[in-house]
Amino acid sequence: MSQPIALDIHAHLVPVDADRLPDLPGVGWDGARMEIDGHKLGVAALYRPRALLDWMDREQVAHAWISAPPPTYRQHLRGDEARRWCAYLNDGLAGIAGAHPDRLTALPHLPTQDPALAADIARLWGGPGWRHFSMPAGTGDARALSEPEFTGLWAALDRIGATVFIHPGECADGRLRAFYLHNLLGNPYESAVAISHLILGGVLERHRNITPCFAHGGGAYPMVAARLQRGFDSARPDVDGRATPPDSLLSRIHVDCICHAEAPLHLAEQVFGRGNVHFGSDWPFPMGLLEPGAQLAALDPETRKRILQTNAAALTGVPNREKDE
């Protein structure tokens, strides 16, 4: 039997509103699957909240954060088109969670390709009782999250005291077209780039009320964390030696546990802190932890208890009272 799980910070759903979809160019619905900008998003469970809830019951998951998956990011959209699409996603996710408030929390999507719009959405949704959001790790182009045009977004999230789940989109490196590397290698790379910019660009230092949560164990960042610290210590070009050292900010970052082996999971704990690694499933995608009881069985009981139960209190503020097995 699976061990009880207090919180899944990384689950995906796509809302289906057949009345609104015809007004959204580039998106189609055939009654079973959604086609987005010519790409068929074929994972049927993405459109079925009941399937997620049934899985949660089987795996003893008490609560899940639901966010839009990368195929829905549509980072080529700007302005009114992006606003309409984000409103569709966010209204739909909120409606799903509102029907199951004891089990699900919706994370409104922040479109990083349009930072001013993302700030507007943060202000619109943020407030008492709603401070959880999701956003891509990149912009879909060469811009980075530390650039000045993101100042308004970070300020809005800081005022709210937001918790932000940050998920990689596709990496633009053309060398990754083969072997599914745009996902297998591109995703962890994108997360590492985002974390590096938040730290070295001073975003985390200036906005201490934001709690960032990264998918996939923080991607490649745990492996290069010491290298960035060495770059800071040795005054490498463009690294501000007057800023807070990178290692001093790592305890601000939370990550999920989707690392696929014990060694990188323990490295994530060493880098970000044992209390900052949380259960994430990436439901319903096969690269996730859809069978957590089996996939995490090799972990020692103390580590399993931290990740599956007690660490959730750091993100929810509600102490976990599960008894030891």
Image (cartoon, helix red, strand yellow):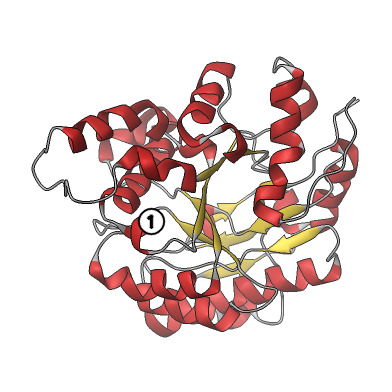
Residue 218 x/y as whole percent:
47, 38
Left-right relation of 123 to 257 = left
The image quadrant where one finds the C terminus is top right
Closer to the camera in the image, 6 or 191: 6
What residue lies at 55% left-to-right and 41% top-to-bottom? 255
Residue 114 screen position, x and y as percent: 36, 73
When the figure is inspected, residue 322 is found, relative to residue 138, above or below; the finding is above
Q: Is residue 109 above or below residue 46?
A: below
Left or right placement of residue 197 versus residue 297 in this view: left
Q: Residue at x 34, y 53 (%)?
A: 198
Where is residue 183? Give x, y as percent. Answer: 45, 37
Q: Nearer the viewer, residue 307 or 47?
A: 307
Q: Position of residue 287 (x, y in %)?
A: 60, 33
Residue holding disc 1:
204
Quadrant of the rendered structure where residue 76 is? bottom left
Query: Residue at position x 22%, y 30% from top?
Result: 230
Nearer to the camera, 188 or 182: 188
Farthest left residue?
A: 237
Residue 151 visible in the snapshot: yes
Of residues 43 and 141, the one drawn nearer to the viewer in this rendering: 141
The amino acid type of the residue labelled 1 equals Leu
Indicate the quadrant where residue 324 lies: top right
Q: Is residue 72 above or below residue 43?
A: below
Q: Residues within 10 Å of mark 1 (few under 14, many from 20)?
A: many
Q: Is residue 39 visible?
A: no
Residue at the image point whose x is 34% and y is 63% from the top: 206
Please tell me whether mark 1 sits on a helix, a strand or a loop. helix
For the N terminus, the quadrant is top right
How many marks on residues? 1
